[in-house]
Image (cartoon, grey):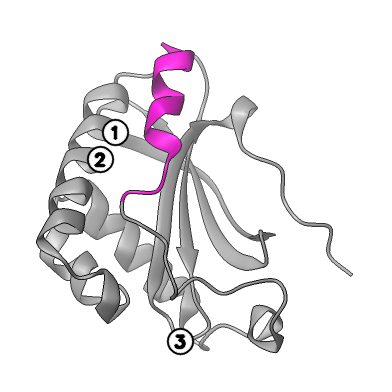
Amino acid sequence: LSAVLMVAAAPLFAQTGSTVSTDTPAARAPLPNDSLAIARRYAMWTWTNQVDSLMAHSPASERTAENRQQMVDGIAQMQSRVGNEMALVEERWVRRNGNRQYWRVATFSDFIDEPVVLRIVIAPNGEMIGMGLNPLSRVPPIDAEP
């Protein structure tokens, strides 16, 4: 099941021009003061299938019917693999590919091998610019902090 779960680790929608590059000063821009509340809200919307809310907080250029359907399908796939969140283990911020990511580590009802990490990529303006899901032992590498 671990290998199958990694399939859902791809972004739920395209990350085009709105993604912050590590080559720009914006890559190191701070997140909004309420970024933890924003990230928790995005996680809740994910697990309660509130795709329209997630899309409304994505870059305007990404709010297409195709990306919406990709998000619907991706969330359904994630939920079918892990089930319901049972207990929060840890939440933390990391930097990956120059962007800040909220990592929500939790245990789930249908994936009992190990905790699972919901990764939500948040831009300095608070928009959600990506999302992924991995078993804790298979999270992608993070950037070295200076």
138 relative position to 65: left or right? right
Which region is colored magenta? 1-12
Q: Is residue 68 above or below residue 83?
A: below
Task: Indicate the amino acid at tag 1.
Answer: Met
As drawn, the label of residue 64 is none
Residue farthest along the front direction in this orientation:
17
Q: Nearer the viewer, residue 107 or 128?
A: 128
Q: Estimate the spatial distance between the alpha carbons at disc 2 and disc 1, rounded to whole Å.
A: 6 Å
Task: Indicate the amino acid at tag 3.
Answer: Asn
As drawn, the label of residue 125 is 3
Q: Estimate the spatial distance between the alpha carbons at disc 3 and disc 2, rounded to whole Å.
A: 24 Å
Q: Is residue 105 above or below residue 93?
A: above
Task: Indicate the amino acid at tag 2.
Answer: Gly
Q: Is residue 81 above or below residue 106?
A: above
Q: Which residue is mark 1?
A: 78
**Cβ atoms at labels 3 and 2 below 8 Å apart:** no
As drawn, the label of residue 74 is 2
